[in-house]
Amino acid sequence: MRIKKAVIPAAGLGTRVLPASKAMPKEMLPIVDKPAIQYIVEEAVKSGIEDILIVTSRGKAIVEDHFDRSPELEDRLLKAGKVKQYEELKKIAELANISYVRQKETKGLGHAIMCAKSFVGDEPFAVLYGDDVIIGDKPVCGQLISAYEQYGLGTVGIKEVSKEDIQKYSSMKVSPLKNNLYKITDMIEKPKPEEIMSLYSILGRCVLPSKIFAILENTPVGAGGEIQLTDAMKELSHTEGIVGVDFEGTRYDMGNKLGIMKAAIEVGLAHPEIGEGLREYLKTLVDKL
Ligand code: UTP
């Protein structure tokens, strides 16, 4: 079955990037000239996704405005002859069929995914975390969809992280399948040092069968007092296994301050408009460090 639906959870409180995220959703923080969530929607579209559900919450209506038409602005740009900017702006509203649902209480990523149950129905679907931007030639969501099509099992994007970082993320029990693909038979969210099974962690992307909803409904509150998606996927890994894709692409965690700065610098350096200027500036700066 072709995967054409994606869910982008973007309802979190973003406490690690306060005060920036007090009134501005962290998913809307820009990397150079585009909000993080636009990179994510574009990745989904490049991966063949047609219908996207963004899970929002109070104070996040600005996300909806961003993907809507902006007739006044478009008109002004046209009249000023700024056709390129006009086209670019109009395109944002035409990227995909985007709908929204509100997570009324911030009860965790697993709970946010449950809010997508009626949107998803009984098809497999992709999940792209709203604060994880991954830049690369091949869209990561598409890499996971290919693995799903190959194995008919849920797939997750994984990368090896440091021992310090893994305790903030999740740890996977892996065995090699082929190339960059691994079978995952167990996982744990926010492991203590003695619980680490490997340094492979899920980073921001998965493709899941709809049976995950039945599992989520019976998933108790886990790490951090939240309903964890990892706990539900863990059950799936026990019963039928999950495929881990050690994906190609550079991931920027827009949920922490250093991640935001790294994204700005690296994407800025590759940007056709400001890349050269930023490079020169950084060179002068480095001499003073
Ligand atoms: P995070 O755990 O990184 O987001 O969730 P958070 O809870 O906002 O982070 P901190 O710890 O307070 O800084 C990953 C993604 O899941 C969404 C977030 O918006 C983010 O895009 N999320 C998280 C929800 O949609 N609902 C939740 O209840 C929790």
Image (cartoon, rainbow, N blue to C red):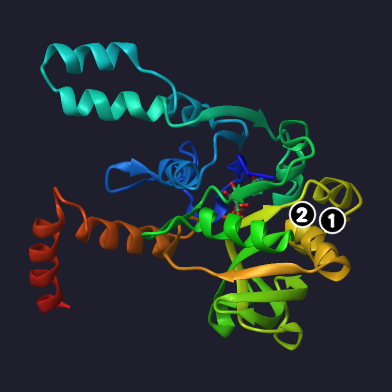
Q: Is residue 194 left or right of residue 179?
A: right
Most extreme residue toward the bottom, as rendered?
194
Q: Nearer the viewer, residue 226 or 149?
A: 149
Q: On screen, 59 above or below 19?
A: above
Give 60 or 1, whichever is nearer the viewer: 1
Q: Position of residue 190 (x, y in %)?
A: 70, 71
Q: Callout 1: few (<14), some (14-19), or many (20+) C-alpha neighbours within 10 Å? A: some
Which quadrant: the C terminus? bottom left
Reading the chain from its start, which is encountered first: label 1 or label 2? 1
Inspect the image, locate mark 1, and give the three-letter code of the amino acid beneath it: Val
In this figure, what is the number of numbered marks?
2
Question: Looking at the picture, how far across and down is residue 183, in whole percent?
Answer: 71, 75
Q: Quadrant of residue 276?
A: bottom left
User: Residue at position x 77%, y 42% from top?
Assistant: 114
Q: Is residue 283 above or below residue 111?
A: below
Residue 91: which numbered mark, if any? none
Instruction: Mark 1 and mark 2 in contact? Answer it, CB < 8 Å.
Output: yes
Looking at the image, which residue is at 51% across and 68% down? 247
From mark 1 to mark 2, how far is it between C-alphas?
A: 5 Å
Judge whether residue 170 can be spotted in this image.
yes
Question: Can you give x and y, in whole percent of width and height, for residue 83 in the image?
Answer: 16, 22
The numbered dot on residue 226 is 2
Q: What SS does tag 1 mark? A: loop
Callout 2: CB less than 8 Å from ligand 1: yes
Position of 164 relative to 126 (above/below): below
For this view, does 84 lie left or right of residue 1?
left
* 217 sits left or right of 284 in the view: right
Query: Residue 221 bears which disc, if any?
Result: 1
Q: Quadrant of the N terminus?
A: top right
The answer to whether one can see residue 169 in this image is no
- Point 41% across, 46% down: residue: 39
* Badge 2 element: loop
